[in-house]
Amino acid sequence: MIPASFDYLTADSVEQAIGLLKQHGDEAKLLAGGHSLLPMMKLRLARPNVLIDLRNVAGMRGIKTTARGLEIGALTTHAAVAQSTEVSAYAPLLAEAAAAVGDVQVRHCGTLGGSAAHADAAADEPAALLALEAQFEIAGASGVRTVAARDFFVDMFTTALGPNDVLTAVILPRAFPASAYAKLPHPASHYPVVGAACALAVSGGSIEGARIAITGVGSVPFRATHVEGLLAGIPVHDRKKMESLCAEAARGVEARSDAYAGAEYRVAMADVMAARAVLAAAERAR
Amino acid sequence: MAFTSMMGARVTRREDPRLITGRSTYVDDVKLVGTTYAAFVRSPFAHAKITRIDVSAAKASPGVLAAFTADDMRNVGDVPTAPQIEGLKVPKHPPLARGRVAYAGEPVVAVIAETPAAARDAADLVEVEYEELPAVVDLERAVAGAPYVHDEFGTNIAFTMEINGGDTESAFKNAAVTVSERLLNQRLAPVSIEPRGMVAHWEPGPQHLTLWSSTQIPHLLRTQMAVALGIPEHRVRSIAPEVGGGFGSKLDVYAEEIVAAFASRALDRPVKYVETRSESFMATVHGRDQIDLVEIAADRDGRISGLKVKILANLGAYHQLLTPAIPTLTALMVPGAYDIKNVAVTLHGLFTTEVPTDAYRGAGRPEATYLIERAIDLLAAKLGMDPAEVRRRNLIKKEQFPYASAVGLTYDTGDYHAAFEKALQLAGYDALRKEQEHGRSEGRLLGIGLSSYVEVCGMGPSSALPAPGWGSATVRMEPTGRVTVMTGASPHGQGEETTFAQMVSDRLGVPIDDVVVLHGDSAIVQYGIGTFGSRSTAVDGAALYRALDTVREKAMKIAAHQMEANVGDLEFKNGKIAVKGNPEKAMSIGEVAFAAFRGLNLPPDVEPGLEATRRFEPPNFVYPFGTHVCVVEIERATGAVKVLKYVAVDDCGNIINPMIVEGQIHGGIAQGLSQALYEEIVYDENGQLTNGSLLQYAVPHAGQLPMYELDRTVTPTDVNPMGIKGVGEAGTIGATPAVVNAVVDALAPFGIVNMDMPCKPERVWRVMSGHDGETNEKAAKS
């Protein structure tokens, strides 16, 4: 488990990181918590010539409430997200998804931004961020921009991040106290075989709008828009109704298949996990 | 057995503080001046001809000292294999592939460099050209004919073994009912926490090789290395430092060990190699991997009259040390704990283009137990009987021991019904069945699984094994009264530093802290056979028991002389040798030891020193047994299996340390349960390992395992002087069928009678959704 040789650089600021990316081009990779990139390098599946460590970059860590919503620095660890009382109150879904990542050691090294930027097809937090309609703050050579979650996750291991971009923060514009995450974990990796994130807007005891994101089924987390539509207007106490409407959550999605779980099973489990997430979220609205 | 206070005491393991705080030395901690590092280029193909190897770029890479191929090692012997099975086909197995490869991961080139990174980088520069040959991965096709793994044999059948006990044909002809099933016992990876590692150090001055290896068999390794490399055995020293688990996978001699020693001698430098986890998955032996066709004949009351088993055993590409012997243990144990007079077994050991299989915790017996325990449940389903009742009617009775099994073994001692009834009682079996019935009416999928196993272990006698079947021990009283024990066992987690010290403390009356147990170094310890097959306490422990007897006898003689008394007037009590009825006149064992060391006033026929080396060869194996009860609930929506309750009543004879016995059973159940629910090695049709990493191969976390409720019965063996059987593998052997029987029982409302392992959620879900799975209807036709 020895990676190919590489140069190790550290950036003290976002600007410096962008500068180093420009200087080294395709050869360079940004290093956050290292819990996805380093294993791939050790297996020599990734062979960057230059690693730019972001750990000393000021201002990219931590959780704060601003006029834009709840802002979470990209270098904030899964553990910090999971344990944050602010996150738990504002969007319990994200705290649950962060708590469901890996194991204790992984959660204390791996970062929210790293997980999002890596965009594994079966990661927990990207689904949560998609359901919460997070905004991704990206610093690039031409300045800072924000990208909506639905545009951020492009494909497996592919995001809206350009070659000279740094993901600096994730912004949750709206609180979803009625939100929850459900997953069927892989017995070895504990990645979700299928995970479902649900954020409900509730008004007068009924669902005003549901946002459901599914991970593990397609090459990228997706919104179960068809189920979302059906749930509008349903009373949050009508568990049977809500459960029955979570059918075909993965409609229209080309499902993945591997030695552990086939496509058909993943599609079926999307419904089961979606229903669990919806019911748990609805429970929080009562 | 004349044991006193220390025997049966829950002494905490003395070796644990250093192990769990990392203050100990594993192979990778051995750091010698001038060490070089090996990296291996491994075959990416399951089966191929090697048409060209070019190591020039690797040799020119910075820090590289050498790049060896099979051509460089022409004078080195093959990777050794021990079993002497009639008609066994033994393929050539050079340490580095010569001309062809037969599994993905087979070592082809070894690069030696100044650092591990330089070696790894250079290995990437080696060019090997292959001409692919067809992979052989399907056992049922492999047994039928071409393509062959080894063309020179014109078959994939390495050996066939037939056992016929009684008259099976008549039993089946006259049977009121028969059931049959095809059972898969999937391939598993041993996954010890420390992967294989070795440091080979050739010293040109004394012409001496020292090999540190993460091995279970340091002395056997030494002999085999001497033979393979042509180095006189007395110039080879083998050391097993701390070994982080083995489970049978380190009961072996590996190509990499031979290459490292060869390279050290070629370069006059120490050579270290520690495999990565990925390499461990692809190149360390695997376990299990059989297809078992089982048929049972019985009367309407569920009394079994006949058993037919056909075993297709996947040996992999080559024979490692014990590869072909493992499935023969399956063949010998197919009747399990049941009184079945007519048994016919056909075993085919088959070559495939996969990494060799070899011993893995249980080694052949889990497969036997699985097939008979599943078959009992199939019979119960067919007859509509409670599976507990079918077991009760067929278990061998207490008065039948020693019991001659239909396949030719003699089970030493047992009271199978006692353990069985105790387990049912502890589990609350009748109440569980009521709860299950009630649960089903509410749509809950509860299952109760039983497994009544017997296993064969305590490996000896020599005549029954491909290796020596004896154990050895030395007890040395030091001048200061402390005791040094050298055991021929090679503990790597089993706790003999504690249990053997308890024996010494008990027999010599010294505090346990005055005893040290040394092992695993051929320059310090007399020849030992190592630790495997649940043999250490039953065999090497018995040798220690004998050595302690010899020391006691000599101590009595010396004490009698010194105290001017007759030996017959002395008693050995509480660490003192005293004149009976006159406790004032006494010597401690320490005082006797000093007198023996000082050499003054010894009896004329007694040599100085107080030390004994003894060996023990058991006249038979030992046969631990027990009954496990598992309760599961299946989640309808996902197919996830949750273990609600796990009860195990095991009988391993007399016990030295209950805490260590329980620990062994806990770990054993964890591995057995894990085969039932989580683990499987998957090769694709091209012979590529698809899940060779801990991201994919599911070794369970603590949270994926239940709490265990344990109890025991105690039926001593008469095979050794302590009445002790083995316990290292019992949990693994008992657990797998108990869990699968529970899962199948839970699925009974769906008409299910069998399910392949692992019972992972998708598989269970598919069965419930009617996608596949075998039903009663199919079983009824058979």
Image (spheres, coloured by chain):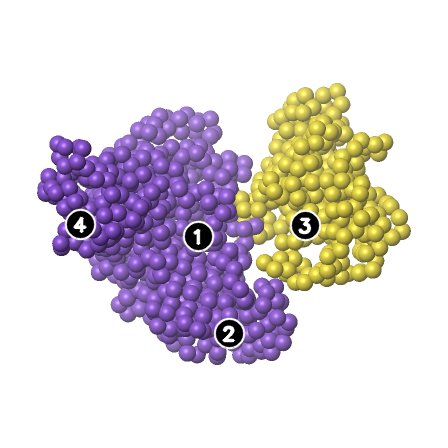
Chain colours: A yellow, B purple
Q: Is residue B485 visible?
A: yes
Mark 2 or 4: in front is 4
- Disc 1 marks which residue? B242
SS of the residue at dot 1?
Answer: loop
| Residues at marks 4 and 1 touching, judged by CB atoms closer than 8 Å | no
Residue B516, position in %: x, y?
A: 35, 47
Q: Amino acid at mark 2?
A: Leu
- Disc 3 marks which residue? A34
Number of numbered callouts drawn: 4
Residues at marks 4 and 3 on the same chain: no
**Disc number placed over residue B601 in the picture, else none:** 4
- Disc 2 marks which residue? B267
Q: Rounded to the nearest whole Å, what is the CA distance between mark 1 and mark 3? A: 31 Å
Mark 4 or 3: in front is 4
Of residues A48 and B226, the one nearer the viewer is B226
Dot 4 or dot 1: first in sequence order is 1
Q: Amino acid at mark 4?
A: Asn
